[in-house]
Image: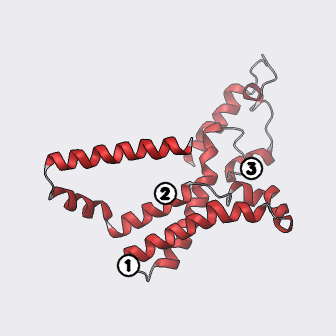
Amino acid sequence: MACFFIFVPLGFLFFSRQPKYTQAFMWNRFARFSFDKFIQNLTGYAATYNGEWWFIRAFIAAILLGTIYYYLTEKIHIVYVETGLVLFISVITVKFLPALIKLDTFSSLASSYLWTQLFMPDTFVCAYLFGIVFGKYDIFASIRSLFSSYSSINRALIGLMLIVSAFYFRQLQE
């Protein structure tokens, strides 16, 4: 946020009187100050002043989703239950919600700003929620202790099988 208050005024200071070599948006984004555009960029509604600000909407959605998930699962202390819950939420957000939006009853949601910018289902949901579960139960420490009991040859073979499996499943998607 501090970078926004540093670099956007610098953009207006140095690039507002720049000659327009083209009508492309990149050259004239600082030509005229608009309070509406400034507020839209500040809140993350638009990213016209700084194209690198695109992630703010995904960041806000992740904060909202993480907070809701935390409060829903704060009394659950079984890793398998939470893993099942993450898989269920992922299937709902990636498969069910897009199909629901295609119905005539909910078709107006597809064009709403709130849906398209914050709650549009994406595959990041599964990875983000699994990250929360892995952190909560320290799963990497469990995996490390499990693999430390194997010999180095067995660990190498397991790693090779995982890499080959990842490539195989990736090729199935294409």
Q: Are the residues at dot 2 and dot 1 in contact (C-beta closer than 8 Å)? A: no
The residues tagged by marks 2 and 3 sit, at their Cα atoms, a distance apart of 29 Å
**Label 1 is placed on what type of residue?**
Ile
**Colour mode of the rendering:** secondary structure
Query: Seen in the image, is 91 located left or right of residue 46?
Result: left
Query: Is 63 left, or right, of 25 in this rendering?
Result: left
Residue position marked by numbered label 1 in the rendering: 78
SS label for mark 1: loop
Q: Is residue 166 left or right of residue 31?
A: left
Q: Nearer the viewer, mark 2 or mark 3?
A: 2
The residue under the point 74% across, 49% down is 40
- Decide which of tag 2 and tag 1 comes sooner along the chain: 1
- The quarter of the picture where residue 16 lies is top right
**How many angstroms separate mark 3 from mark 1 (CA)?**
42 Å
| Spot occupied by residue 143 in the image (x, y as percentages of width and height) | 26, 60
In the displayed structure, 74 sits above or below 28; it is: below
**Image quadrant occupied by the C terminus:** top right
Q: Amino acid at mark 3?
A: Gln
Residue 5 showing in the rendered view? no
- Residue beneath the point at 30% across and 60% down: 140
Rendering coords of residue 74 (x, y %) = 45, 79
**In front here: 17 or 96?**
96
Q: Which label belongs to residue 40?
A: 3
Q: Which residue is mark 2?
A: 127
Mark 3 secondary-structure assignment: helix
> Counting other residues with Cα less than 10 Å from the Cα at mark 1, is it few (<14), some (14-19), or many (20 or more)?
few
